[in-house]
Image (spheres, helix red, strand yellow):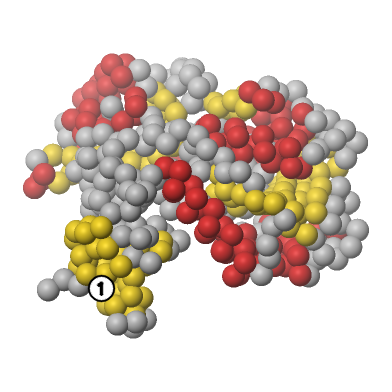
Amino acid sequence: MNPIVDILSLDHEGHGVARIDGKVTFVDGALAGERAEISVYRKHAKYNSANAVAILSASAQRAEPRCRYFGRCGGCSMQHLEASAQVAAKQRVLEESLARIGKVRPDVILPALHGPSWGYRHRARLSSRLVDKKGGVLVGFHEKRSSFIADMASCEILTPDVSALIQPLRELIVQLSNADRTPQIEVAVGEHVTVLVFRLLEPWNDEDAAKVRSFAERHRVQVWEQKKGPDTARPFWPDIAPELSYTLPEFGLVMPFRPTEFTQVNTAINRALVGRALRLLQPRAGERIADLFCGLGNFTLPIARSGAEVLGIEGSADLVARARENALRNHLPNARFAVDNLFEMTPEKFAALGHFDKLLIDPPRSGAIEVVKSLPDSGGPQRIVYVSCDPATLARDAEVLVHLKGYRIEAAGVANMFPHTAHVESIALFQR
């Protein structure tokens, strides 16, 4: 007989938290305040993992998932929670991480940055697999807790035009001679064109190529082929197409990029996040500012618009080359760039860069611990804006900044970059 439990809270992954005989049980599909019948699918030494079989008493914040594949597809985990409650839950994750891990508390909690909850995803990596039992090719995201691909024909978080391509892609790939050797299609939606990058373990033959060209023309997309690593991606058809780019209208910037280069998946929230970062940083002409983990210049170029001298540093030589091109494209000679491994930063290396009045840090999930440890104990940047995609590593780095380097965390808040997922994007301001 399945146990019946009361859901006490949500964890950082959006699972309900219950207790069975004192043992913590994480319940997929249940919300705080609910009473649920559950099925335990895995027992660990210190906790259980379970699925909600039936909701006996529903939360007022429960919502009807829009996607027909929710619960099977692993792309979303929180469609059953009302959108504003999702954001509130992410804000709690940020505050709890800062308090528990970093032992810090912001002076001000910033209002959450909201954007479209549906059709927001401009970047995606779709998997493809020939599955005879399903009668053809599957294209989409992986099933929950599985390496299998969900049998899906649409997606509510992809842009509508890309969602509408899932079924045609299934029908195209199954006709190709290398249908079982096309494991992935990377999607990049720009201002003027949508690009599909096909990862090919075997090349297309002439008949395949004709079918792919016809598909590209019929659906008005540009197709690229990628035979090995990302640097091998090349336009296939049409070979001349509109420029793949996004814009930051508040700063009058056009940002071209290759489909395999990193850009944020949510264009609307990226614009809002850049605007907030610049208002917190307050760059001014005459200042010298560093943008660390700068990528293709997403924050560097807006900082340069202020007239400040800005140095962007990034570990990828290809991204730095793109950032330099974007600075030239936008007529910003006061933006300079350098290639360096910021995960190997030392106090000596940081000092050799010269004095910075302010600092913007936008690291990957692993955070920027070597950077913050390398900051001088006094006389360094007076203001730091830290953009984070993992509240745990932000909190870890905040502990160093506040308790060892003499900064105060003035403000922090979340940006809902990935609605309907447990991913927490956030931003914090540190002031000395």
Residue 126 percent across, percent down from the top left: 33, 41
Is there any visible trace of residue 374 in the rendered image? no
Mark 1 lies on a secondary structure that is strand
Is there any visible trace of residue 192 in the rendered image? yes
Q: Quick check: 223 left or right of 278?
A: left
Name the foreground residue: 351 vs 70: 70
15 up-or-down from 254: above or below: below
Write the residue at 50% across / 34% down.
115
Write the residue at 57% across / 36% down.
270
Q: Disc 1 designates what residue? A: 42
How many numbered discs sit on the rendered protein? Answer: 1
The quarter holding residue 196 reads top left
86 up-or-down from 209: above or below: below
Name the foreground residue: 49 vs 96: 96
77 up-or-down from 203: above or below: below
Write the residue at 54% across / 26% down.
245
The quadrant of the rendering that contains the C terminus is bottom right
- Give, as a three-letter code, the residue at label 1: Arg
Residue 77 percent across, percent down from the top left: 35, 51
Q: Quick check: 48 left or right of 89?
A: left
Q: Quick check: 106 left or right of 73?
A: right
Residue 226 percent across, percent down from the top left: 39, 38
Name the foreground residue: 249 vs 128: 249
The quarter holding residue 284 reads top right
